[in-house]
Amino acid sequence: MSMRRGIPAGLLITLAARALSAQTVASAGTAAGANVPTYAKDVAPIFQARCQECHQPGSIAPMSLLTYDDAKKYSRRIKAKVEQRLMPPWHIDRTVGIQQFANDRSLTDAEVSTISRWADAGAPLGNPADLPAARTFPDPNRWQLAEKLGKPDLIIKSKPYTLAARTQDKWFRPEVETGLTEQRWVRAIEIKPVRDHDRKIVHHVLAYLLQPEQGVTGLASTAHEHQSNAGLFMEWAVGKTGQIFPADAGKLMLPGSKIRWEVHYHAIGEEIADSQVEMAIYFYPKGFVPQHRTVLRMFDLSRGRDLDIPPNEKTITQNYYVMPAPGRLENFQPHMHMRGKAMALEAVYPDGKTEVISQVSNFQWNWHINYIYASEAAPLLPKGTTLIFTAWHDNTAANPNNPDPAQWVGWGDRTVDEMAHNWIDVTYLEQDEFDKLVAARAAKNAKKAAATPSPSRP
């Protein structure tokens, strides 16, 4: 065997080949350098715009992405998350249904490509002179709607609750006075845990408005026979910020009203004392009465807690609702737990036409996103439209969120149980107004189509 300084000749040939290969790759990288995204020039602006508000110390994300070292350390993980469309948390199916939303925080295809190619290239820094100035972020636990609406007009807190370090899930249902002394119409509502510690143990929050109201003031006359109450005042779960109602809609609060909270807590191994949640309310100006009363409805797919999810199986659950009056859907917010896989809403119009309104195909139980439709896209549905809600649950080992594929699962409040419903704000409309809105939207869409160049048209 031929030897040189104790190294086998065959191995020398292999090492030489690898060195040549490395030179070739390096040369190729240099030649294609202009096309390789760098952190300083290409990636940092995306992170600043889309990621850093959550990925900063004290916010809800598990790690910070404020610096290049942070980003490089997690580059492979970041690539995987953005390519799977898991991050930023925006899980609406981009291939079907409405795609215009007022609160869209997803990455564009180009941004995903930039991040992926940057990670594949070894996460290069690039020229530090290209780095954008560091952003200064406000308190991550602030009121999110304050940037648009300013200081809340009214803040209502739940009573303090102390959760033991180790215990089963708890549901705390205190009632508190709103302190309101006059009738006011609500423009926007936001709920959040008060402190960082509270955020760690709060699973979800429901806020019921208790007030002596006869019927539902402000409801379209077409809906009075079908809507006997004002529905839930607001709901919150991880991933939801707040909701600004359309300019022609709102919710009514009366003097002497109360809020009945339902706060779902889960223990994290340390005692959290005096936990609270709070709700910010933004009013319309005094004396202003919006044209419509919007109603938050729970569209229940489980038909009254009837869920049957056998071990090691995937299931489909459906339920149907008929629009009792013309209306506009303001949002789409699926709610399931750890076995939840997907949920869709389809409309069957009175003329037989069918349309997928929205679908989440990769539901993430720890992100309850409220997809708020843009005003020009919010579905306008005539009376008699059938809404078909479909939920898919995956109780197999293929579901990475499944804690026990061998366990039968039914409806229940705990996260290890299941649910299947959708929170949607419905604004019922008078028939003549509905007809005008449909006509105006059709005219706008026709004008837009006429202005769009056709591939076959010069």
Image (tube, rainbow, N blue to C red):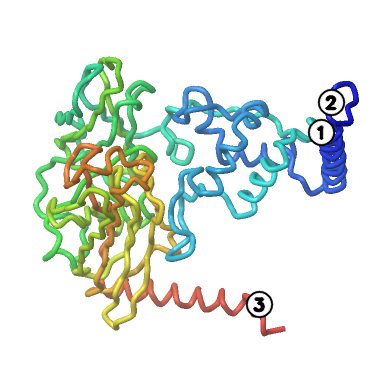
Q: Which amino acid is tagged 2?
A: Ile
Q: Tell me: residue 97, above or below residue 339.
A: below
374, 369: nearer the viewer: 369
List x then y, in percent, for residue 235.
Answer: 27, 42
Mark 2 → mark 3, Cα distance in angstroms = 68 Å
The 10 Å Cα crowd at callout 2, few under 14, some 14 to 19, many 20 or more, is few
* Tag 2 near tag 1, CB within 8 Å: yes
> Contact, CB < 8 Å: mark 2 with mark 3?
no
Q: CA distance from mark 1 to mark 3?
A: 62 Å
Q: For the residue labelled by badge 3, is the local secondary structure a helix, a strand or a loop?
A: loop
Write down the quadrant of residue 390 in the picture. Answer: bottom left
**Furthest-front residue in view?**
1
State whether residue 14 is above or below residue 360. above
Q: Nearer the viewer, mark 1 or mark 3?
A: 1
The residue identified by callout 1 is 11
As helix, strand or loop, the secondary structure at mark 1 comes to helix
Q: Is residue 386 left or right of residue 400?
A: left
The answer to whether 323 appears left or right of 345 in the picture is: left
Q: What residue appears at the point 18 percent right and 55 percent down from the top-left corner?
A: 302
Residue 169, quarter of the rendered image = top left
Q: Return the residue at label 3.
A: 453
- Residue at image mark 2: 7
- The residue located at (16%, 35%) in the rendering is 260
- Quadrant of the rendering where the C terminus is positioned: bottom right
Residue displayed at 44% across by 72% down? 441
Q: Position of residue 122 (x, y in %)?
A: 71, 37
Mark 1: amino acid: Leu
Q: The residue under label 3 is which amino acid type?
A: Pro
Near-viewer residue (24 or 256) = 24
Q: Nearer the viewer, mark 2 or mark 3?
A: 2
